[in-house]
Image (cartoon, rainbow, N blue to C red):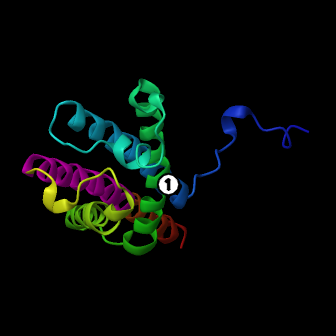
């Protein structure tokens, strides 16, 4: 009976999968990126707000300009960021380099501000954006890409190192 009933302190937690941790990293990165995007817009470093992309493009309700629109935009960016983290996880997780995260951020900026921009009617084309907006948003995307990329790559490489060390220790 005593062997069957383990003490609570002796039970080991189920490890969280690497993919799950990567998705959490993506969600948190999206929340932080969305928050700082709102800050850039609020302090006039950028003429484009995350609300402009996600809500104002398709909705005309008055609540979009309130705190609810801001919070909903940030949460939506967090959810969309799950996809970007998953893509990074699948394609680049083995590359443990800050440069890969920087490049990933720049590519995402180019996709958002150039390739898919035409589906957002209230966002000016890239050539009509101010230099402040371009520089500020590129910097934000570089920080976001670096956060996502380096966090996922570091976690992957650290996990693989620990697995190899455990395997060597057992043999």
Percent coordinates x, y for residue 65 in the rendering:
39, 29
Q: Residue placed farthest to the right in the image? A: 1
Give the residues in magenta. Answer: 131-154
Q: Is residue 167 left or right of residue 119?
A: right
Q: Is residue 28 left or right of residue 11?
A: left
Q: Is residue 161 left or right of residue 15?
A: left
Percent coordinates x, y for residue 40 in the rendering:
21, 37
In the rendered image, the quadrant that contains the N terminus is: top right
Residue 149 falls inside the magenta stretch:
yes
Percent coordinates x, y for residue 45 in the rendering:
14, 39
Q: Which residue is mark 1?
A: 23
Residue at the image point whose x is 18% and y is 55% from the top = 138
Q: Is residue 105 left or right of residue 78?
A: left
Front residue of this view, candidates 171 and 155: 155
Q: How many marks can you see?
A: 1
Q: Quadrant of residue 117?
A: bottom left
Q: Is residue 170 above or below residue 141?
A: below
């Amino acid at each position: 009976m005593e062997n069957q009933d383990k003490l609570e302190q002796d039970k080991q937690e189920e490890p969280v999968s690497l993919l799950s941790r990567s998705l959490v990293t993506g969600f948190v990165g999206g929340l932080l990126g969305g928050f700082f995007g709102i800050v850039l817009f609020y302090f006039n470093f950028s003429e484009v707000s995350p609300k402009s992309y996600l809500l104002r493009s398709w909705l005309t309700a008055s609540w979009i300009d309130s705190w609810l629109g801001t919070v909903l935009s940030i949460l939506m960016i967090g959810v969309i960021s799950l996809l970007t983290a998953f893509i990074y996880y699948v394609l680049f997780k083995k590359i443990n380099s800050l440069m890969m995260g920087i490049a990933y951020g720049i590519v995402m900026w180019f996709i958002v501000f150039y390739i898919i921009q035409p589906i957002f009617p209230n966002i000016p084309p890239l050539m009509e954006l101010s230099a402040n907006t371009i520089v500020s948003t590129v910097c934000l995307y570089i920080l976001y890409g670096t956060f996502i990329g380096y966090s996922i790559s570091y976690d992957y490489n650290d996990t693989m190192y620990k697995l190899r060390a455990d395997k060597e220790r057992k043999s």
